[in-house]
Amino acid sequence: MGAAVCAAPAPVSDVTSGSLESRMAALERMVDARTNAQHSVQAQLDQVQNEVNDLRGVVELHSHKLEQILERQRELYLEIDKRIDAVLKRPASSQPDYTAPLADAGPTAGSMSEQEAYDRAVNLILRDKRYDQAIPEFEAFLKAYPTSGFAANARYWLGQLLFNKQDWSGAASHFERVISEFPDSNKRADSLLKLGMIAQNQANLARAQQLYEQVVREYPDSSARKLAEPRLRTLKAN
């Protein structure tokens, strides 16, 4: 931010003595000094205003980008939830064998920036609906950027994709790593919930109940709790 707005006071002259001409000249000097001071103050105010406008533009740009990211994540969550419902209603015998498809010709995760590689994998789910293709993309992302700030989300979505294919063991391994390696991740509650659902699908009801209770106890304000509670009531009723 620019310097504080200030200006030197106009010089004070004695205009009560001397000839008329000298008094007029003194008055003119006072007026000129005051005018110059006002111009200086206005210039500083204009500079401050320009800096404020620049900062406001930067804030608005970042806010817009953040809202785009959040909206994309909301759409992704909805899409994944629909896939989960379809999986849980599908008989286990109808589970297809999983073979990772060949990746399209294009840049690999290691040749792209961290953000580009993550966006590529996410867009395969959200935009292109190519769920099988997204699996090797997320695997490549985690191999190239194991300490990324997106690593917890990437591992969660990889577990989710395998969950949708009823690959319970593969999905569980990723959810367990989210829980153990990223204790502060906002996907930890969802990972606990999914582990409970996997245990329930595998008829390990005691383990499922334990995981649902952990979700309710540790994340009472989460959406995962709202999904865990009815499943917990069903288990206890039986």
Image (cartoon, rainbow, N blue to C red):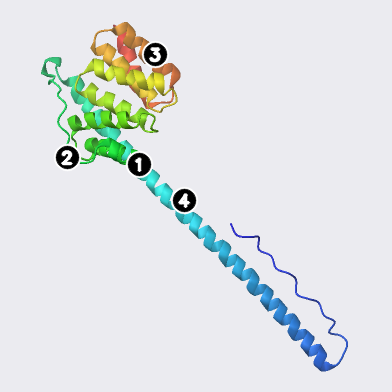
Q: Nearer the viewer, residue 58 or 225?
A: 58
In this view, the mark in front (2 or 4): 2
Which quarter shows the N terminus?
bottom right
Q: Earlier in the sequence, mark 2 or mark 4?
A: 4
Q: Circle 3 sits in a helix, a strand or a loop, which is it?
A: helix
The label number, if any, that marks residue 69 in the structure image: 1
* Label 3 Cα crowd, 10 Å radius (few <14 / some 14-19 / many 20+): some
Residue 114 locus on image (x, y percent): 34, 38
Cα distance in 3D space between marks 2 and 1:
27 Å
Cα distance in 3D space between marks 2 and 4:
38 Å
The label number, if any, that marks residue 105 in the structure image: 2
Q: Is residue 186 above or below residue 32?
A: above
Cα distance in 3D space between marks 3 and 1:
31 Å
Query: 234 left or right of 130?
Result: right
The label number, if any, that marks residue 59 in the structure image: 4
Residue 204 locus on image (x, y percent): 28, 7
In this view, the mark in front (3 or 4): 4
Residue 68 locus on image (x, y percent): 35, 45
| Quarter of image, res 163 | top left
Q: Nearer the viewer, residue 177 or 81?
A: 177
Cα distance in 3D space between marks 1 and 4:
15 Å
Residue 128 locus on image (x, y percent): 19, 39
Which residue is drawn at the image coordinates 28% and 23% (left, top)?
A: 159
Q: Circle 1 sits in a helix, a strand or a loop, which is it?
A: helix
In this view, the mark in front (2 or 3): 2
What amino acid is labelled 2 in the image? Ala
Q: Circle 4 sits in a helix, a strand or a loop, which is it?
A: helix
Q: Earlier in the sequence, mark 2 or mark 3?
A: 2
What amino acid is labelled 4 in the image? Val
Q: Earlier in the sequence, mark 1 or mark 4?
A: 4
- On the question of residue 78 being in view, the answer is yes
Which residue is drawn at the image coordinates 85% and 93% (left, top)?
A: 19
